[in-house]
Amino acid sequence: MSETVRCIIYARVSTDAQSKEDKLSIPDQVDKCVAHARVRDWSVIEVVRESHTGADLDERPEMTRIRRMVAARGADVLLVWHPDRLSRDPDHRAVLRYEFKKTKARWDAVTGHVSDGTIISNAMDYISGVGSAQELERLRAALQIFVENLADYQSYFAIMTFGMEVKTLQSFTNRPDKLEKTFNKLLKDEEGLSTHAYDAVDDAIRLLQKKSPTSIKNQLPKRAVILITDGFPVGDTVAPRTVIERANNAETSVYSVILPSFSRLQGNKKPLMTPLEASGLTEKTGGKNFYATRNNYEPLFKALAEEITASYVLAFYPSEPNQRDGKFHEVKIKTLRDYTIKQNRAGYLIKSKK
């Protein structure tokens, strides 16, 4: 007969105010963890709740008590809803993994990546820690320059974040003061900025369709979603294939900026392909992946602005017999010279008349 696995559930929010939010609430985290433990037949010996920033480790009273309990061989597993509930800093998670290993204990999570100590797994653990204060400060400065670079193109911007839930911080505007105020809000976000990436892109496309200007100075605007992420989406309800289809139907290109949380292990080298890249979300919507491999993000966003403004839209009008025959017609763009072509729609399908 196997021994009973003793489990401690740990639920955390950064502030008391956040504990009242549905998707970040402590009760919601506890419910998910209890269900996770029940399926595995673990014995929940204690449920620990704490309101404290995830940027600290030793300063958290309840977490300190848990660490002492594990050190005294009082528990086998520490269970959290997501690794960032344990800590936002991957170094902290590595410390806990090292401490727990001494008593053959471990920590686990309902969703999100759980490192097993291997090199690749550690790399993924570091990647999941995107959103440090230093990164966000550099990101804020680079985004402001990005907005300035596109000011001459009569551009409108909306800003969304996606941690445990997708939020619209600023709807479409071309006012620099509003954007700057929103960028400053990013610095106060304690919950990280990368989890439900596909859900966020899906919401962004819907926002473009509903609230973005249909024309600017009698011209059709280019629609683009810029996804700033670690490349490891977690917990999405919308599949990548659905997001790609919706983006193409909305004539929207998706660009990704993959932040350099992998840099401690790989230096300035290009990282291994992430699940986001493997999904084809950028390539299949006419976008491109950008890698932030240095501390200075400004050159990257300058290149991104050039990429967006250098592209244009070609209109195609099918012949009369093919307009409503109910069949899919492939459309392929070719050039006489070796120009780079990114085509986000492979063809068209118009429902036949009944």
Image (tube, grey):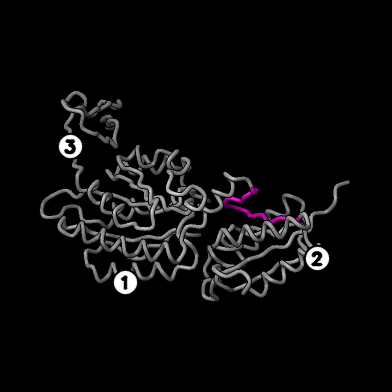
Q: Which mark is residue 28?
A: none
Q: Which residues are magenta?
A: 105-117
Q: Secondary structure at mark 1?
A: helix
Outermost residue, front side: 267
* Residue 46 in the image, given as x and y percentages of width and height: 75, 66
* Residue 268 in the image, given as x and y percentages of width and height: 42, 48
Specify the amino acid type for callout 2.
Ala
The residue tagged 3 is 314
Specify the amino acid type for callout 3.
Leu
Q: Secondary structure at mark 2?
A: loop
> Would you say the magenta stretch is mainly helix, strand or loop?
loop
| Residue 286 vs residue 235, the one in the foreground | 286
- Horizontally, is 58 left or right of 261 in the view? right
Q: Which mark is residue 181?
A: 1
- Horizontally, is 161 left or right of 72 in the view? left
The residue tagged 2 is 72
Residue 111 inside the magenta-drawn segment: yes
